[in-house]
Amino acid sequence: MRSLYNPNERVVKSGGIDVKGCVCYDCASRYDLTMEKRQAKPRLKASWLLLPPLVAFVLFLTYLNDLRSQPFFRFLVANPLVYDQQARDLLRGIPSSQPFFLSPLYPGFVATIYFLTRGGHFAVAFIQGILLAIDVYLVGLLGHKIFDLRVGLLAAFMMTFYWSFYYFAAELLPAILCVTLLLASTLGLISQSKHVKILMAAILIIASCGFAAHIAPLLHCLRGASSGYQRPDFLPNCLMLSVFTVGTIAILGLLVANKTPRGLLGTTLAGLLSGIATIVWSGSLIYIGILSLWLTRRSRKVLAVWLIGVCIPIAASLTHNYSISHRFIPLTTSAGVNLFIGNNPASDGMDPFRFGEGDEVRIEADRLGLSGAERSAFFRKKAGEFITSHPIAWLRLLGRKLILALAGFEIDNNADISERKAAWHLSRVAILNFGILFPLALGGIGVSSKKHPHARVLLIGFLSFASVCVIFFSCERFRIPGIALLIPLGAYGLVEILQATAKRSARDLAFMLALAAAGAIIANLDFLGARNTEFPSIIANKAYVARLAGDLATAEDLANQALQREPSNAGAYFQLGAIELARGNRVKAFSLFLDSLERDPFFYASYQQASEILREANISSSYLNAYVNSLLDSKDVKALREEMLKYLRKRFQQ
């Protein structure tokens, strides 16, 4: 008898005892003869899987305690700053006027934590630390269900000592929440045990709370303020709340009653978790698409039920976006922009701020005043033009991004990973990285395909998220969900290598070591010199944080470093201007703000500060407007610049 959801598990009953792993009744007698001997041997217990999450949480608290005093933790930049502002807008009752650009759900998740704890970034990091511990447990369960308990326990400990997960747990980014949802969803497709279903339902309820925060009128009323929402924005948000409230109650009722078919409930839960993962981070859609093809070959009924669960959260996001823009936008409007960032003549496949010749395209989009959806379509078109007009250059760039996606080190994000790692005095504890995991996983892949068909799901997951880096641009937060799914394969590869060594199985050992050696060469040789690359944009971010922390000398040094690497970096000029303004040198600050605008006429922060200086000097901002318009029209601005500086020197006597 073959299990519907675990084709590796054959069950034969003998004398009222279930005999797993047997193909015929003759095996039952051998099972009975060896039963006493097996019971005499010490065995691992499933409860041991709780140990790695506890270790991970303690390590995370240590890391968080070390990090909380660091400027990069206290002052947010780039995406974390956007998420923080969106969450606070939700709490202040400011309605959304544009379709979702980044994550549809994550700002609501952050707002919920802010609302319940009356806290800030530290509270979010603490909750994400709990999610990290849950992720460690889920990875252990995946290894246990697909392979065996030894592999599960080893996989959980491998994730415990993989430092990147600590970084993302402490960052205001949706990576850890997305990993939690995807691991739980994948586990639900592999195992249909009651324990797994209860775990999935609990995670579903936690994730659905993020949607409650998107119901801004509800939070607004809870805070005792008057509602000022437009009706078109209010209705879709109420629909989102209704769908998930009713859905969660129904699922809990079915779970308690347990009257549904064995696979239906678990598959529905898995689908809902996968769907919510896509509205936490839209890159998960690639994994869902490829996973659908795998499910098609197994059972169309399972696929249909799973897709229904997937589509419910996406439908809620679509309703929200359509009500605001009257455009068909299922998730976000960031796809076109991200596609252009990684597919333009100046792209290096890594730095999300590097446009080069693409700056003209960005300025053109700004001048046209495009909406979110129109802007996405505009950049998608420009990326397509680059691909079709420069196919050889694009193929080289594609190969570069593939190598970067398989690089054995953390790929820089908006905030510098190395800065965070250096702040942790236990950084040497977490010695595992992708350059170690990937070779082990290749060895595991080589021997798992026939023995453990469900291991293909893990491989599909990793390849899906590696493809996100290849399609768009390489970044650690893009591949981190794939790394989580790859860890059980790495643990299995290590176990198999050790077993082959113990059994002196030279053929199997040579095969796995050959695969592992190939993976080690790919992951650990820095073909592109990317390991020593520090992005000018990230250096400018460091200068910004140092300035906010009051260390002007360090901020000035960092801004100058950014300009040495990239003389056209408008952000570095802005930081230098802000530093001079803090020192009271208004004329020099104004000159630096103009330098920033010359590099990027749409750098609003520089325009705003320059306007404020003119206002203090009782000079009309029309001069600055004429200056910016001349820059946009590629006219000479030298005379106008000197005229404004002359007035300012006279006014401030500098």
Image (spheres, rainbow, N blue to C red):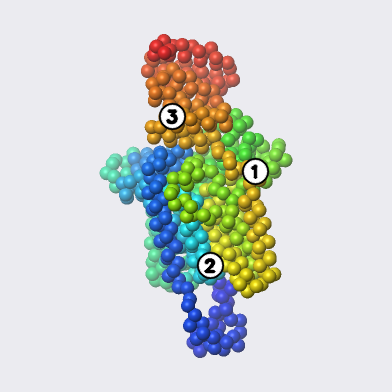
* Image position, residue 310 (x, y; %): 51, 57
Q: Tell me the kind of residue under disc 2.
A: Val
Q: CA distance from mark 2 to mark 3?
A: 51 Å
Q: The N terminus lies in which quarter of the figure? A: bottom right
Name the residue at 67% across, 57% down: 518
Res 579 → quadrant = top left
* Image position, residue 296 (x, y; %): 61, 63
* Image position, residue 161 (x, y; %): 49, 57
Check the image and report above or below for 7 versus 531. Answer: below
Q: Label 1: which residue?
A: 528
Q: CA distance from mark 2 to mark 1?
A: 34 Å
Q: Secondary structure at mark 2?
A: helix
Q: Tell me the kind of residue under disc 1.
A: Leu
Q: Can you name the residue that lies furthest to the left here? A: 224
527 vs 615, nearest the viewer: 527
Q: Secondary structure at mark 3?
A: helix
Name the residue at 47% across, 36% down: 542
Drawn side of residue 67 relative to residue 351, left or right: left
Q: Label 1: how many residues lie within 10 Å, few (<14), some (14-19) or many (20+)?
A: few
Q: Earlier in the sequence, mark 2 or mark 3?
A: 2
Q: Tell me the kind of residue under disc 3.
A: Ala
Q: CA distance from mark 1 to mark 3?
A: 33 Å
Q: Label 2: which residue?
A: 151
Q: Label 2: how many residues lie within 10 Å, few (<14), some (14-19) or many (20+)?
A: many
Contact between marks 1 and 3 (CB within 8 A): the answer is: no
Q: Secondary structure at mark 1?
A: loop
Q: Label 3: which residue?
A: 553
Res 194 → quadrant = bottom left
